[in-house]
Image (cartoon, rainbow, N blue to C red):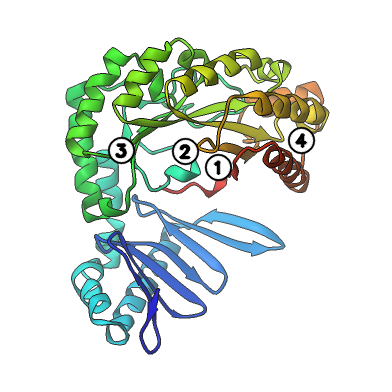
Amino acid sequence: MRSTATVLENLSSGSTVLSPDRERVVSFDREGRWLFYFRRGETFKRSLASEVHRRYRRRSTQRERLADSAVEELFGEVDELARELVTATSAEARRRLQTEVLRWTPETLAQERERFLSAYRPIAILPPDQYLAVVLQATEGCTWNGCTFCNFYMDRPLRLRSASDFRIHARRVEDLLGRGLRMRRGVFLADGNALALSNDRLDPLLDVAEEVFPGKSLFGFVDLYSGDRRTVSAWRHLAERGLERVYIGMETGSDELLEWVEKPGSASALEGFVKTLKEAGLQVSPILMVGLGGVEYRRRHREASLELLLRLPLDRNDLVYLSPFVEHQESRYRELRVAAGLTAMDEAAVEIELDSLAGRLRQGGLKVSRYDIREFVY
C-alpha cells in the first residue's frame, strides 16, 4: 500500500484498491469493474452479475441484497468517486482509472447481469477460500439433492455437461472475466457435487479447463456417498490432473443426526474416505454445520463431531470449516424440526458453540476457519 498526498493505493497485478480517506475504500478488478466498496462502516460487494450485497452492524451483523433502485444509486456514487480520484492519485493509478475504470458507466455495469447469465446458471455457494476462483459448472444441480436442510439446488434438476457444451461455457466465462482473470487463483468445479462424476466423464472436462485456464489448480465439492466409490489410484489420477483440495459436507459426526437430516453417510465411512483422499495426496476440507439439530442435539452433535474430526488423518495442509447453521424458512428441515418439537439455537448460542468447537479443534492441532453461507457473493 502506497500513498499520494491524500489517497492510499494498492496497485497489484490483479486489482486496484484506492482509499481517499478513513471512511472509504474501493477495489476494482483489472477490467475496471468495482468489486468492494467500504463506506462509513458499511461494506458493499458487487457480484459478477452486478447484484450488490450490503453488510453492516446494528447490534449484530446485518446483511441484505440491495434493491435495483439502490444499486443504481450506488453505481453512480462509485462512478463519481472514481472520477474525483483521477486528479488525486499516482500516474499508474490515474492510468488505470482512465483506461479501465471510467470506461464503465453505471448503465454498462448493470448490463453485466446479462453477460453473467449467458455464461452461468446462478452459482449457489462456494467455500470461502474459493470466492476468487474461476467457477466452471461441470454439472448443474446436485447428484443427491435430498438433504432436508439444503435449498441451494431445489429448483435445479441435475444436468451433466458434455465436453463440447463445457468448452462453450468455459469460453463464455473467460470472456466474462476478461482481465479480471488475473485475480482468480484456481478453478472450482461446480455445482454441488461435480466430483461425483466418474473419471471417464471428468477427464474430458479437465482437458477443457486446462485448455482455457492453463496451469490453474482444481477444487470441488464431493459428498461422502459418491466420493467413497473411488479408489486411491482413481483419486491420485485426479490429483495428477491438478485437483488440489476436496470439500466434504460432513455436517455432523453423529450418525443419528445425519439420518435425521436425510444425508447419506456415517462417521466410519467419512473416516475411511478421508484416509483414501490423503493417501492420494489431496488436501481435505470437512465442513461442519454448527447448530444443526438445535438445542436437543447440541451435546451429541458437538461431542460426536469433535471425536470424529480429531481422529481423521488431517494435517496442516487441510482446513476444517465451521459453518453457522442457517435454517431456511421454506426447507423441509424446518417442517421436521417443528413437528419433532426441537428447539432452534439462536444466533448467539450458535456463535458460542462455534467458538468452543474452534478452540478445541485448534488445541488438537487442526487448522480451522469460519464458513458463513450468508457472506457468499460471486
**Which residue type does callout 3 highlight?**
Tyr
> Which callout, 4 or 1, points at the residue further toward the start of the chain?
4
> Which callout, 3 or 1, points at the residue further toward the start of the chain?
3
**Which residue type does callout 4 highlight?**
Ala
Q: Are marks 1 and 2 in contact (CB under 8 Å)?
A: yes
Residue at mark 4 to residue at mark 3: CA–CA distance: 35 Å
Residue at mark 4 to residue at mark 1: CA–CA distance: 18 Å
In the rendered image, the vertical position of residue 111 relative to residue 246, given as above or below: below
User: Residue 250: which quarter of the image?
Assistant: top right
Q: Are marks 2 and 3 in contact (CB under 8 Å)?
A: no
* Label 3 residue SS: loop
Give the residue at mark 1. 373
Give the residue at mark 2. 125
Give the residue at mark 3. 120
> Which callout, 4 or 2, points at the residue further toward the start of the chain?
2
Residue at mark 3 to residue at mark 1: CA–CA distance: 20 Å
> Which callout, 1 or 2, points at the residue further toward the start of the chain?
2
